[in-house]
Image (cartoon, coloured by chain):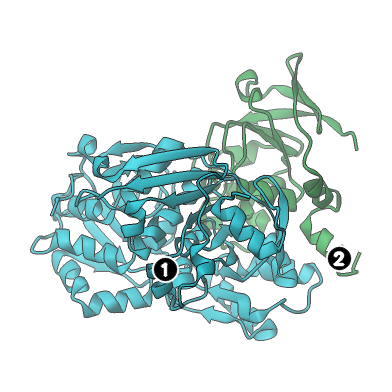
Amino acid sequence: MKETFTARVWTLGDDIDTDIVIPTEYLAMKTIQDMAPYAFSPLRPELAGQIRPGDVIVAGKNFGCGSSREQAPEVIKALGIRCVIAGSFARIFFRNAINNGLLLIECPALREAVEEGEEISVEVGSAIVCNGVRYPVAALPDNLLEIVSAGGLVKAMRRRNGLE
Amino acid sequence: MAATMIEKLLRRNTGVETAKAGDIVTANVDRVMIHDIFIPFVKDKFEEMGFTRLWDPDKVVLIYDHLVPASQLDDPRHHRIGDAFADKYGPIHVHRSDGICHQLMTEAGYVKPGDVVFGTDSHTTTYGCVGAFSSGIGYTEMASILGTGKLWVRVPETIRVIVDGTLPPNVSSKDIILRLIGDLTAAGASYCALEFSGSTVEEMTVASRMTMANMAIEAGAKCALFTPDEKTADYCGVALTEEMTALRGDEEAHYIRTIRYQADQLVPVMACPSQVDQIRPVAELEGREIDQVFIGSCTNGRLEDLMAAAAVLKGKKVAPFVKLIVTPASRKVYLDALENGTLDILAGAGAVITHPGCGLCCGRTGGILTDGERVVATNNRNFLGRMGTSKVEIYLASPASAAAAAAAGKIVLPPAF
């Protein structure tokens, strides 16, 4: 599965916590679509309205730290973000994103190299190309690839239960 | 083969005698906790996955705490969905207004030493205080556990933290964990287990250990672990067994890092806005005026925390312009503090005593703040917007430091009784 795409970049800093991704006051809304306009509102209230489907986020280290709220990767996906590229990811966010089929890529060198609004090219499991420079990235471990290739954990469980 | 505490615990749980850091194993889950914010999502995912029954209803605990009492019009819907879920798939354990999930899981006896427990909340690391492996997960994984009783985990590497000696009288376990988070940074223990030991830790109450395990996640840790002892067994209402005391990391085991503190060298500290790892000594922050103080949460809302605050506030009044909000972590804590006179002292000093629950800690109710206001709080997160607008300054502190600030109307060192 060799997937390559180009995308417009939105940049964020280090330690973007899940209270920033989606504040607690919006968590009891009925649907993820209801919550999505409030994504990143404590830090950049205008951002959710500016993101277009197919864009990517490039952030620093420890993206998704904080609470276990799975609405965090879900609202990012609902905004149409193709993948999040960060220096590193917090562990609960990492699991939640994989289980929802949101692509995450670790690439510590990229954040300093890219400006917001620039386009980058992503070769999944292989490299990111930005301003002519190639940044190698790792592929996911096998057990996680299985979940992603099943289309997320819900589908993997449906298959287990003989529904797909 | 020498092993860390988490390796021993997961070997026992999985039967994989060779399990070591880095291996991926399938854990058999002893208990799960779901709270009110996430139950509608857990239910939807569970049914979407095609499950029709819980793997073991007795192992499922549903706790209403974030949205109790309801503060927004959509909140009661979560409780109705939770009740319907319990009716349909039960009998499960449901707590509708008894207190904060993490307090209840240990206090009400749902977690025992050596257990593997998952919860839909990042502060699920708390149960490491009784020697359980416990960690936070999302609602999709929770749904899969409800159907299968299992979850894959990567056996974490371990950072060993050894604290020896006697703490100064105005320094508490909160100051130790804040200092550690500052030294490790917010990502410094990512994917790792924190294993605590040393004479200071051995002397500590289970409640104080709970404060430290609770905040392990703020350094990114997967779990925190304390070896079970007599105090643990007493707290859990079980007999201490050799199996429990054997849950101790071997000296020769592989630790990726060892951090040592001398307790008598530690000082009161606070986490400054708006990151948990921005730690500074209280002595350097003295004089900053404040608008509000919050004493409560799963981090520091227990009887000993309220008593520490009362010791500072006895015979004093809260500064006239400061709101002091005290939120006991559970109904039991509330009743115990009522019975031993602690609530008398706090209310007499001018505190607003609220219902047990998450309250202000999750920024939805009971004292939210606005632009330019400053709060000293005993909970675990000072993120942007956590307790109101994104222009609120949150300082995280021990109960004694928080109480001292409430009386002075500004940040001051807590008294060294």
Tally of numbered tags: 2
B208, above or below B373, in the image: below
Q: Colour of chain B?
A: cyan
Quick check: A20 left or right of B24?
left
Quadrant of the image occupied by residue B319:
bottom left
Q: Amino acid at mark 2?
A: Arg
Whether residue B223 is visible = yes
Q: Give coordinates of residue B282: x percent, y percent.
A: 24, 41
Going 9% across and 60% down the picture, which residue do you hit?
B316
SS of the residue under disc 2: helix
Q: Give coordinates of residue A119: x percent, y percent.
A: 73, 23
SS of the residue under disc 1: helix
Give the CA separation, mark 2 to mark 1: 39 Å
Q: Report which residue position mark 2 lands on.
A: A160
User: Which residue lies most toward the left here?
Assistant: B315
Going 64% across and 22% down the picture, which residue do you hit?
A109
Q: Chain of mark 2?
A: A
Q: Amino acid at mark 1?
A: Thr
User: Which residue lies most toward the top here?
Assistant: A132
Q: Give coordinates of residue B337: x percent, y percent.
A: 25, 74
Going 58% across and 69% down the picture, which residue do you hit?
B34
The answer to whether tags 2 and 1 share a subunit is: no
Q: Report which residue position mark 1 lands on.
A: B232
Quadrant of the image occupied by residue A7:
top right
Q: Colour of chain A?
A: green
- Depth check: A93 or B384 in front? A93
Mark 2 crowdedness (10 Å alpha carbons): few <14, some 14-19, many ≥20: few
- Depth check: B298 or B209 in front? B209
Q: Chain of mark 1?
A: B
Quick check: A127 left or right of B10?
right
- Depth check: B8 or B157 in front? B8
